[in-house]
Amino acid sequence: MDQLAFGLTYSIAGGLAAVGVGLVGAAAVAAVGRNPDAIGTIRTMMILAMSFVDALAIIGLVVALIIKFLK
Amino acid sequence: MILASLPEPVVSVGAQTVFQVGPISVTNSMLFGIIGSALTWGLLIYTTRRVKQRRYNRLVVAFLWMYEYLINTAAEVLGDMESAKRLAPLAITMFFFILINNCLEILPIVGPVTYHGVQLFRGLAADLNFTFALAVVTMVTAQIWAIRNHGFFGNLGRYFANPFKDPMHAFEGSLELVAEFSRFIALSMRLFGNIFGGEVLLAVMAYITAFATPLTVPPFMLFELFIGLIQAYIFFMLTVVFVSLGTMGHHAPASSSDTFALSGEAAT
C-alpha cells in the first residue's frame, strides 16, 4: 500500500505538472512567433513560470519520499 | 547481484544532529551552512575590495554583472531605482547566499563523509528550517515596507474592511490575508523541495548505475547547478515581488503589466 501511495503521489503530481509545463512552453513559443524581438524577456518569464509549475511537482516528490521513508 | 551488495542510499527528510553544544544541537546542515556563509562573506568582501581599488578580474566582473542584472530587475519591478537600492542589501545578498550554498551542495563530500554514522555534510537548503527562516525574513520585510508606505492602520486596511460598507474589499482582504500565510509555505517548500529532491536524485542515480557512476552522475550535477541558480533567482524575484505588492497602493495600478503577471503566479 505504501508503494502504491508512493507511486501515485509522485506520478499524479508529475503528470499534471508536465501538462502545466507544456502549456507554458506552448504559450512561450506562440508569443515568440508573434513577436520575435521579445525573445529575451519571454525566455526569462517562461523559465520563471515553468519553475513555479515545477515546484508543485517537486513538493509532490518530497511528500512521496516522506511516505516511503518516514514511517 | 552487484546492486544487492551495495549499501542503499540513506534518505532522511530532516537534518540530523551531529553533536551537541550545550542545549543547541548542531546539525549537518548547520555545519555545511557555516562553510557556505564563510565563502559568501569572503567572496563578497573580496569583490567590494577589488571594486574600491578598481582592480577588476574575471570573478569580480562576473559578480558585478550579476549584481547589475539583479538590481535592474528589482528596479523594474519596484518602479524606481531608489527603492531597489534600499532593498538590494537584503534581496541580492539572499541571492548570492542561496546560489553559493546550492553550488556547494553538489560537492561529492555531501553524501559519503560520515561521523559516527551520521553524514557530516548536507546541503543548507535541504533543511526546511533554513528555507522557512528565509521565508520569515522575506515576509516580515514585506510587512515592514508596507507599514512604512501605508502607515500601520493603512496596512491593516489592506486585509480588513467593513463588510457593510465595502463587501467586495472585505472579501478580497480576507483572501489576501490567507495568501499572505500561504506564501510562507510556498516560498520555503519550493526551495527546500528542489534542493532536497536534487540531493536524493544524485544519491539514487549513483546507486542505480553502480560502476558507471562517473559517466552518469556529472550531467545530473550540471542540472543541479542550473536548478540551484534558477531557484536562487526565483527566491530573489519573489522577495522583490512580495515587497512591491506591499508598497503598491491597493487601488493604484501596477507600473507595468510585467509585475501583474508575476504577482499572479507568485500566489501559488
Image (cartoon, coloured by chain):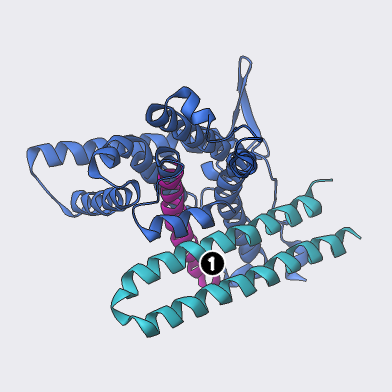
Front-most of B185 and A34? A34
Q: Position of residue B215 (x, y in %)?
A: 51, 73
- Residue B179 sits in quarter: top right
x and y percentages locating residue B128 in the rendered image: 61, 40
Q: Please give the letter of the chain rendered in blue.
A: B
The residue beneath circle 1 is B217
Q: Chain of mark 1?
A: B
The chief SS type of the magenta part is helix
Colour assigned to chain A in the rendering is: cyan
Residue B127 visible in the shown view: no
Write down the region rendered in magenta: B214-242
Q: In the image, is residue B263 above or below residue B167?
A: below
Q: Quadrant of the N terminus of chain B?
A: bottom right
Asked if residue B198 is positioned above or below residue A18 in the image, the reply reads above
Is residue B27 found left or right of B80 in the rendered image? right
Q: Position of residue B258 (x, y in %)?
A: 39, 60
Which element carries disc 1, helix, strand or loop?
Answer: helix
Q: Quadrant of the C terminus of chain B?
A: bottom right
Q: Nearer the viewer, residue B169 or B70?
A: B169
